[in-house]
Amino acid sequence: MRQKGNFYIPLVGLLLAAFAFGALALAAAGAGSGGMAAGPRNDWRLGEGVTYENLTVFPVFARLGVDTSGFVTLDEALASGDAVVTERGSEIIRRSRDGRPIPIQQGASVNQLVLINRGAKPLVLLAGEVVSGGKQDRVIAKDRIVPPGAEPLPLDVFCVERGRWTGGSAQFLSSTVIVHPSVREKAVVEQKQDEVWAAVRSGTTARVSADAAPAALAGGVVAGVIASEAQSESYAKIYKGSRVGQSVEAFATEFERRFARIPREKGDQLIGVVVAYGGEVAWADVFASQAMFDRYWSKLLRSYVVEALARPQTKERASLDDAREFLEPLKGRENTESEPGVYRWRQVTEGRYAEIALDALPKGLTLHWVKILRTS
């Protein structure tokens, strides 16, 4: 019996060690991928959807609090002067370590600007954010983080003002706008300038059935606005101008009123949303904290509203189960880009779906997660 017992104890120890090693390996794999490319965090909870007209938004809650106060948004940094965005052809001044001014000048480019973060915090850029000025308004092409004190950054962008290549201010200003999902998809996933312009002009790139009710913001309406108010095809002038902007604001105001009444459990943090148009769940934006979500919510909502107005009315409504299914992880091809010690960008595509995560390094904190049902 003693020999049998002595054998049994080491065997149990080996099994426990193997189990622990396997658990550590799984944890390391999750940490290496940021834990979110494989799917949403386990502590997310999806709330009942809020519906107005053809737009339904499901709140995403979490219990774990994350401090994101150490990051600054593009709107905040441009407003304070901590960030400078300019055309490559414009002369900008960068200070050397000993305080000497260093002028920087390059040839102008439609799809590239120059950004300097001269603030004290890392700067978060979200794909789809619009900057106004220069030779034409642009939209940020990808999520990324710009550390303080970094070299002037060649910033990838897409034009959202096709009819202008002159005038404007030397530096870009925040327009407090993020483009609506159809345009954002073309910039983020397709990454083709012609398709971005087409999406700006068409309102939506979603498939529309022949028997669907007319949209409030059909392509003909957009064309009329371009002809009368926005000849340069400026995104901000089209969708924030008097004709369309009033409809967007009225819709957004009513939706905000309803959304503010969503029920919460004790300790819930509202960190993101899943968005549906009619019966189709099409989009999700989720952040690391409620504080960060709150900083983007106003312009995100208005982007969802523009898309809703551009899509036809329908009696179908997406269910909570539909939204939960939308949050299921993708298992397709993954692409990654990174700057050591600063950020990692990850994209997974599978069929018509794309999932993108922005991780802050070195801790691997996922600041922003987005999922898209592509319209084409």
Image (cartoon, rainbow, N blue to C red):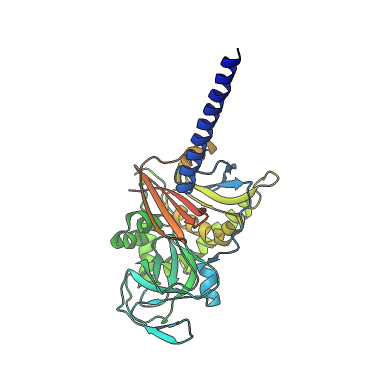
Residue 88 image offset from top left, x and y in percent: 34, 77
Location of residue 298 in the rendering, given as x and y in whole percent from the top left corner: 56, 61
Query: Picture quarter containing residue 198?
Result: bottom left
Viewer-proximal residue among 143 and 139? 143
The residue nearer to you, when weighing 295 against 70, is: 70
Residue 283 seen: no
Question: Can see residue 266?
Answer: yes
Residue 58 higher or lower than 83, as above or below = above
Q: Give me the residue at 63% from left, 55% from top.
A: 257
Q: Residue at x 46, y 48 (%)?
A: 32
Q: Quadrant of the N terminus?
A: top right
Say whether residue 209 is left or right of residue 321: left
Residue 203 position by quadrant: bottom left
Q: Which residue is the extreme one toward the front?
A: 3
Locate residue 8 relative to residue 157 in the image: left or right: right
Whether residue 261 sits left or right of residue 325 in the image: it is right
Give the image location of residue 343, x and y in percent: 46, 59
Residue 154 percent across, percent down from the top left? 37, 71
User: Residue lying farthest right?
Assistant: 266
Q: Is residue 6 above or below residue 150?
A: above
